[in-house]
């Protein structure tokens, strides 16, 4: 199907706004452009506070005063180069309120100043810290999940594979799971709205330390063995029709299913990469949040 009319309006707006192709920007300018496009969320959450997972800044969202909440450790998207706690503040508020469980958003180090595996290492450290500081966070560390969108979905899948702590669920929103960038949708959607093949290549080039790193499962979870995948927690994999990453996300979901992991794979037709962040303007984003939060609640309750 064609782009949803709401998605088309957003795509047209961004196309008109950008005077320089994103992949021609410096990381500093790309971050500034991305930040300038953020609209602060007004959704009220019971408690939001800044915490430090060792040296890693994080933001905790608690939807209630309960002291035994489950916890989603969330890793923001942005190609490992852009994005921060503020860029995904609205997403985390929504997931906390809709699921009834706490969310810990992680401000991992960004490339190219900190190349692979810096972001992965930070995410592993943050999950360990949350597990060890459950009382301080007011959570039950026997009910933890990981999740993220795009690059954050990559990090969530990699952290799950690392078996850092016992996990009940993984939320993978249009995840980048194969740094080889060879799936059919990479070329089919090479000029899709928001994320193009050229922009994805720009992100990967900034993140990877070397071409050899593309074959590391901490960068490319798709390359994990069947034995590793059999140990994974239940998952949701959300994809978008007009997304270069669509096919690799769906292929990863299929591999999880084939290895006996309870996995929900949902493609949002008419949507583009990044739609999950646009909960105030896109009906599909609202539907995806409801779906992901319902499953999160199911596995953390």
Image (tube, rainbow, N blue to C red):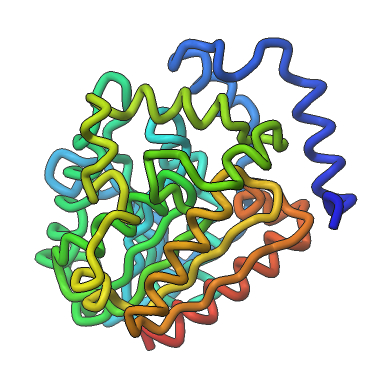
Percent x, y for residue 125? 15, 50
Q: In this rendering, does residue 54 appear at all?
A: yes
Quadrant of residue 47 within the rendered picture: bottom left
Query: Does residue 158 appear left or right of residue 165 in this picture?
Result: right
Q: How many marks?
A: 0
- Which residue shows up at 84% across the image and 58% down it? 1
Could you tell me which residue is drawn at 57 percent across and 40 percent down?
A: 186
Identify the residue shown where x is 31% and y is 21%: 112
- From the image, which quarter does the C terminus lie in? bottom left
User: In percent of the image, x 18 and y 49: which residue is there?
Assistant: 53
Viewer-nearest residue: 91 or 50: 91
Rendering coords of residue 219 (x, y %): 28, 44
Query: In terms of depth relative to the viewer, which is nearer, 239 or 107?
Result: 239
Work out whether residue 178 or residue 276 is closer to the camera in this orientation and state it: 178
Which residue lies most toward the right here? 5
In the image, residue 123 above or below residue 231: above
In the displayed structure, would residue 240 be above or below residue 21?
Answer: below
Q: In the rendered view, would you say 253 is above or below 276?
A: below
In-front residue for pair 195/289: 195
Image-quadrant location for residue 104: bottom left
Q: Position of residue 184 (x, y in %)?
A: 58, 47
In the rendered image, residue 22, in percent from the top left (x then y), is placed at: 60, 19
Residue 135 appears in the picture as rendered? no
């Amino acid at each position: 199907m064609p782009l949803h009319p709401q998605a088309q309006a957003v795509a047209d707006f961004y196309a008109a706004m950008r005077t320089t192709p994103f992949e021609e920007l410096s990381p500093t300018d790309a971050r500034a452009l991305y930040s300038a496009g953020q609209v602060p969320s007004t959704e009220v959450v019971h408690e939001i506070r800044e915490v430090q997972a060792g040296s890693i800044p994080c933001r905790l969202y608690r939807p209630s005063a309960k002291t035994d909440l489950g916890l989603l450790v969330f890793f923001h998207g942005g190609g490992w180069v852009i994005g921060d706690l503020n860029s995904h503040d609205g997403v985390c508020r929504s997931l906390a309120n809709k699921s009834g469980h706490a969310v810990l958003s992680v401000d991992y180090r960004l490339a190219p100043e900190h190349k692979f595996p810096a972001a992965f290492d930070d995410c592993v450290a943050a999950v360990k810290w949350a597990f060890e500081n459950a009382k301080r966070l007011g959570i039950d560390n026997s009910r933890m999940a990981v999740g993220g969108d795009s690059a954050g979905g990559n990090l969530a899948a990699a952290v799950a594979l690392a078996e850092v702590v016992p996990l009940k669920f993984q939320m993978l929103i249009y995840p980048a799971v194969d740094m080889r960038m060879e799936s059919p949708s990479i070329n089919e959607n090479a000029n899709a709205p928001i994320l193009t093949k050229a922009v994805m290549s720009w992100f990967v080039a900034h993140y990877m330390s070397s071409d050899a790193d593309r074959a590391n499962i901490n960068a490319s979870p798709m390359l994990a063995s069947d034995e590793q995948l059999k140990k994974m927690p239940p998952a949701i994999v959300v994809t978008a029709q007009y997304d270069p990453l669509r096919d690799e996300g769906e292929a990863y979901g299929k591999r999880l299913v084939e290895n006996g992991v309870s996995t929900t794979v949902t493609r949002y037709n008419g949507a583009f990469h990044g739609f999950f962040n646009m909960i105030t303007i896109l009906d599909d984003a609202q539907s995806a949040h409801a779906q992901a939060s319902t499953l999160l609640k199911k596995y953390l309750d």
